[in-house]
Amino acid sequence: MLFDDLQLLREVLGGLQLLAVMRDGTGKIDYCNEPFLRATGYALDEVRGKDWFELFVPADQREVRRLEESELRGISEQAILTRSGESRHIRWTLTPLRDHDGKTIGSAGVGADVTALKHDPFHDPLTGLPNRALFIDRLSHRLALEQRRPRASFAVLFLDIDRFKVINDSLGHVRGDEVLLEVGRRLQSCLRPHDTVARLGGDEFGVLLEDVPDAPTARKVADRLQDALKAPFIVHGQEIFCGASIGIAQGNATYARPEDIMRDADTALYRAKGQGRGRWVEFDSTMHDRAVELLQLETDLRRAVERRELLLHYQPVVSLSSGEIVGAEALIRWRHPDRGLVAPAEFIPLAEEMGLIVPIGAWVLGEACRQMKLWQDRLGPPNLEIGVNLSSKQFQAPGLVAEVGRVLRDTGLSPRSLRLEVTESLLMDRHPQVADAMTGLRAMGVRIDLDDFGTGYSSLSYLHQFPIDTLKIDRSFIARLGTTADGLEIVHTILALAQSLDMDVVAEGVETAEQLQLLRNLHCAYAQGYYLSRPVDSDDFEALLGERRSWAA
Ligand code: C2E
Ligand code: MG
Ligand code: MG
């Protein structure tokens, strides 16, 4: 009976994946079991007779652990190093081994590998890089050192991936994560081991550069990081281009807290993004003023709505076959009391962030429809159309379809005269509300145009699933017409695609006679751009309509 019990116990223990180690009184390894060897990557003869602490314990913990483990009692959780230098977390139960006289001659340890369960408060689980907390910790050590012995020899870089939101929205989070992982790898490969790269959150990374004697050195590193991120990312066989913006803050002894230098790097980063991405900007103290200015802008924007400082400009959409104006795109402007006319790029993103885009968008829609109905009644052909840009945020908010219906009723504009412009990222929005709203609008007779086509990452095979009437080719493609050989080929391909999907095409941003001619040759149906007319205020647009302005070939 006893024998059977032992046999059973052996079988049970044999099947367990617990790690077992025996050491002698001096810490020399006497025995390790198979699971232990597997977990650490060693063969038995490589470890037998070796000092446990030398081989498996990280150097900075050796002395403490030698002391702790001489007590040989209880359960403890420890990091050990594998043959390849990785660290694994083991939860050990240590038992002393004694001779017949009760004298301790060594120890036996049984442990479970809990690395996978280990929640690490200082590393980002996705990339394995230090997280914000560890970054701040390292930075505060560095600042303390600087105050004792100023050398001005470090710098903090904040880095943000350009267009990451587009990648995430259109390709999904899984692929977005893969891009982040690869970004982390590339950044690390550009830096020296004693520099710190951390993932601060989202698509933002922080770098603490050591030994940066002067500003040009930090700039050179910023260049190198940006170059490393320019090469395409291959995610599931798809090439993705992203690039990054960087803010640089040079360290010095006047910084008392990590937050201060991080704030300055962040301010510089914000500035870099504002200057059109793919750049680095160094912090200088005048930038504080800019941050204050931005806060002021927010306050002003809130008031702009009540104070009726918003207005619409209109840019004609021209038929390339008849040369006539077939419609207008409504483009918002802000007449700021001190700054003059502010362009939408400067305040629409802010309005989206502040949640103000929904009331502003509602105003644009109402005003554009009212104006178009007036023109139709007074002088235009009754089928003149108005294009209104919608932010994705307006689709996510409830009630968009009802709102559009109400505006059409109130203004008397036919649904056939209204075109709503959406961007590719909206198509990738899995929000059920989005698809419902699109279907609802289409059912009402309103048409939907895909704006800035070609700048997102919507997969072409996707397009036919959405009720889209028109592709508006982004102006970056039109700009390449006539200057590069592939420019023509790309536009040609988009036109063929649109035809096969039974969609119309508007070429955006036509700036030269040559571009217009090339588009005509390609049988593109509609165009818009400075060469035809800049966006103009309602009086000037009315004048264009009144004089029956035409751009016939
Ligand atoms: P978008 O909808 O793609 O509008 C076209 C933009 O290109 C306009 O800039 C227009 O002025 C500009 N543009 C037109 N022709 C040319 C050209 O030949 N060359 C160049 N370089 N640019 C040209 P704008 O008015 O500054 O508007 C920028 C963006 O702001 C718009 O891009 C649209 O996405 C957004 N936006 C404008 N109004 C509204 C609005 O009422 N609501 C929302 N949500 N977004 C708006
Ligand atoms: Mg548009
Ligand atoms: Mg556009």
Image (tube, grey):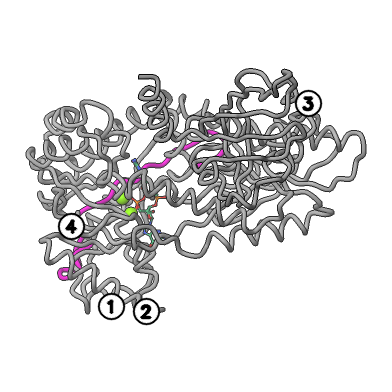
The Cα atoms of the two marked residues, 3 and 4, are separated by 85 Å
Asked if the stretch drawn in magenta spans residue 450, the answer is no
The Cα atoms of the two marked residues, 1 and 3, are separated by 81 Å
Q: Which mark is on residue 482?
A: 2
Q: Where is residue 106 drawn, in percent x and y?
A: 70, 29
The Cα atoms of the two marked residues, 3 and 2, are separated by 76 Å
Q: Where is residue 361 drawn, in percent x and y?
A: 31, 34
Res 459 → quadrant: bottom left
Circle 2: is it few (<14), some (14-19), or many (20+) Cα within 10 Å? few
Q: Where is residue 337 drawn, in percent x and y?
A: 53, 33
Location of the N terminus (image quadrant): top left
Q: Is residue 270 visible?
A: no
Q: Which residue is mark 3?
A: 67
Q: Where is residue 235 drawn, in percent x and y?
A: 38, 58
Look at 33% across and 45% down and name the residue there: 172
Going from the N terminus, do you reach mark 4 or mark 1 first?
Answer: 4
Camera-side residue of 442 and 269: 269
Q: Which residue is mark 4?
A: 326
Amino acid type assigned to the residue bearing label 3 in the image: Leu
The Cα atoms of the two marked residues, 1 and 2, are separated by 8 Å
Asked if the stretch drawn in magenta spans residue 319, the answer is yes
Q: Are marks 1 and 2 in contact (CB under 8 Å)?
A: yes
Q: Is residue 89 above or below residue 307?
A: below
Q: Which residue is mark 1?
A: 518
Q: Are marks 1 and 3 in contact (CB under 8 Å)?
A: no
Going from the N terminus, do you reach mark 3 or mark 4 first?
Answer: 3
Q: Are marks 4 and 1 in contact (CB under 8 Å)?
A: no
Residue mark closest to the camera, 3 vs 4: 3
Q: Are marks 3 and 4 in contact (CB under 8 Å)?
A: no
